[in-house]
Amino acid sequence: MIKIERLVFNPFQENTYIIYDETGEAVLVDPGCHEEGEENILETFLMERNLTPVSQIYTHCHIDHVLGAAFVYQKYGLLPIMHRDSIPFLLRIKEQGKMYGIEVDEIVEPTEFIDEGDEIKFGSSVLRVLHTPGHVDGHVCFVDDKSRFVVVGDVLFRDSIGRTDLPTGNLDILSNNIRNKIYTLGDDFTVYPGHGPSTTVGYEIMNNPFVKGW
């Protein structure tokens, strides 16, 4: 049975997700651990549950979501996996860090890319990839159709949506992706966002003030 755990990291209070199943294999989604203490929290969580991380995958490459990429690569030998359109943002994270007083020592570039319809396989489980730009180019979401949840990064939040005033943001594109790719998953789907608490598709369709249902 698949399980998902949230760890909150870095000054942006970013949600890092560990998704794992009964085999002990785990996928790290948006590891944002920044300082040694946060790296220890992630490492301890994996050790205590005898989990073996097999992939680090990214919804998008704003700095708060990729601060742990180098640590995960150094510790577990896993290169990041992301959409190809995320590369320009990844390559600028040192500049982004300076804006927020955050030092980024190393940029780890991917050799593998994902896009709409691809699958992330681990253990006996599968995550399906949705391409969902609008907050930023290259944004993707990860769907587990069996366990009925979706990890949405900064596309959708409880009672809110991702910012569209940053480079390559587009409100129309974001709204269309929420309506056509997230809201169509099913009311009972749990939504795990990049910041803040989880929600459900049904709740957002009825209550989200920015993108309500049909």
Image (tube, rainbow, N blue to C red):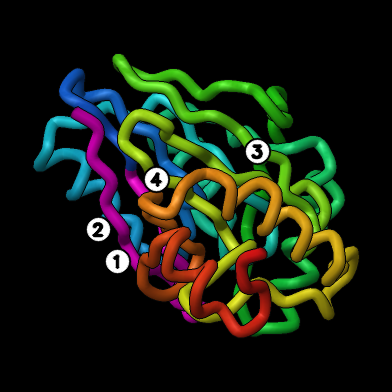
Quarter assignment of residue 108:
top right
Q: Which residue is mark 4?
A: 149
Contact between marks 3 and 1 (CB within 8 A): the answer is no
Q: Is residue 88 left or right of residue 66?
A: right
Q: Amino acid at mark 4?
A: Phe
5 is within the stretch colored magenta: yes
When the figure is inspected, residue 201 is found, relative to residue 118, above or below; the finding is below
Q: Is residue 164 left or right of residue 1?
A: right
Contact between marks 3 and 4 (CB within 8 A): the answer is no
Query: In the rendered image, which quarter contains the N terminus?
Result: top left
When the figure is inspected, residue 87 is found, relative to residue 194, above or below; the finding is above
Foreground pick, 128 / 19: 128
Q: Amino acid at mark 1?
A: Gly
Contact between marks 4 and 2 (CB within 8 A): the answer is no
Identify the magenta region.
1-18
Q: CA distance from mark 3 to mark 1?
A: 33 Å
Tag shown at residue 41: 2
Label the magenta part by its dominant secondary structure: strand
When the figure is inspected, residue 176 is found, relative to residue 212, above or below; the finding is above
Q: Amino acid at mark 3?
A: Leu
In this view, the mark in front (2 or 1)? 2
Q: Which residue is mark 1?
A: 37
Q: CA distance from mark 4 to mark 2?
A: 24 Å
Contact between marks 2 and 1 (CB within 8 A): the answer is yes
Q: Secondary structure at mark 3?
A: strand
Q: Could you say where residue 99 lies in the image, as x and y percent from the top left?
A: 74, 83
Q: Please tell me which of labels 2 and 3 falls first in the chain.
A: 2
